[in-house]
Image (cartoon, grey):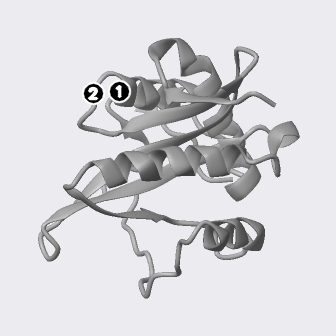
Amino acid sequence: MELAIRPAELIDLPALIHGNSALAWETERKKLDGPTLSLGIDRVLNDAHKGFYTVAETDGRIVGHLLVTFEYSDWRNGWYWWIQSVYVWPEFRRTGVFRRLFDHVKAMALADPTVIGLRLYVERDNERAQKTYVSLGLEEEPYFLFGLYPLPGREGTIGTTKLIADR
């Protein structure tokens, strides 16, 4: 299989919406609000300060994607790149698509002296993904993830877009 890895473009928005929607359903049984998701992805594609999507494509069809966002560490004086929104179409899993996406992003990070590390989070019970990440050289970090979402007073909307409650 010939696989091209490239930066996502605005024309890829429908595929990114599809992949992220499927990811949320498969991993957390969450149905995402389409307009909110579309706007969120569009904002990333149009503002490099928010992050960037990378896509894997074969025969003109996107078969996988991931999002990189940024976290600055004052302790380490550099940037962590967070890998998020990882999705590979089911029929292309276990064919090296994620490995190629990861290797591409890792090479980009290594080429940028301000990037000090790569991070991602994974569902605790997703052992298959965890094994994949370990095989790529990632190590479990000594942190638990905590959050406050949605913020008090923002339970129903972001701007004018209604959120769909967790199911």
* Quadrant, the N terminus: top right
Residue 160 seen in the figure? no
What residue appears at the point 50 percent right and 39 percent down from the top-left corner? 163
- Image coordinates of residue 145 in percent, x first then y, are 43, 75
Choose mark 1 or mark 2, whichever is in front: 2
Q: Where residue 29 is drawn, which disc sits there?
A: none
- Look at the picture and state if 59 lies above or below 54: above
Comparing 79 with 147, the one in front is 79
Query: Which quadrant of the figure has residue 74?
Result: bottom left
Within 10 Å of disc 1 (Cα), the crowding (few <14, some 14-19, many 20+) is some
Does residue 40 appear to the left or right of 65 in the view shown?
left
Residues under numbered marks 1 and 2 in contact, where contact means CB atoms less than 8 Å apart? yes
Does residue 119 appear to the left or right of 58 in the view shown?
left
Comparing 85 with 53, the one in front is 53
- Image coordinates of residue 78 in percent, x first then y, are 18, 63
Q: CA gap, disc 1 to disc 2?
A: 6 Å
Amino acid of disc 1: Arg
Q: Which residue is mark 1?
A: 43
Amino acid of disc 2: Asp
- Image coordinates of residue 64 in percent, x first then y, are 67, 36
Q: Where residue 47 is drawn, which disc sits there?
A: 2
Does residue 126 appear to the left or right of 159 in the view shown?
right
Q: Residue furthest right?
A: 91
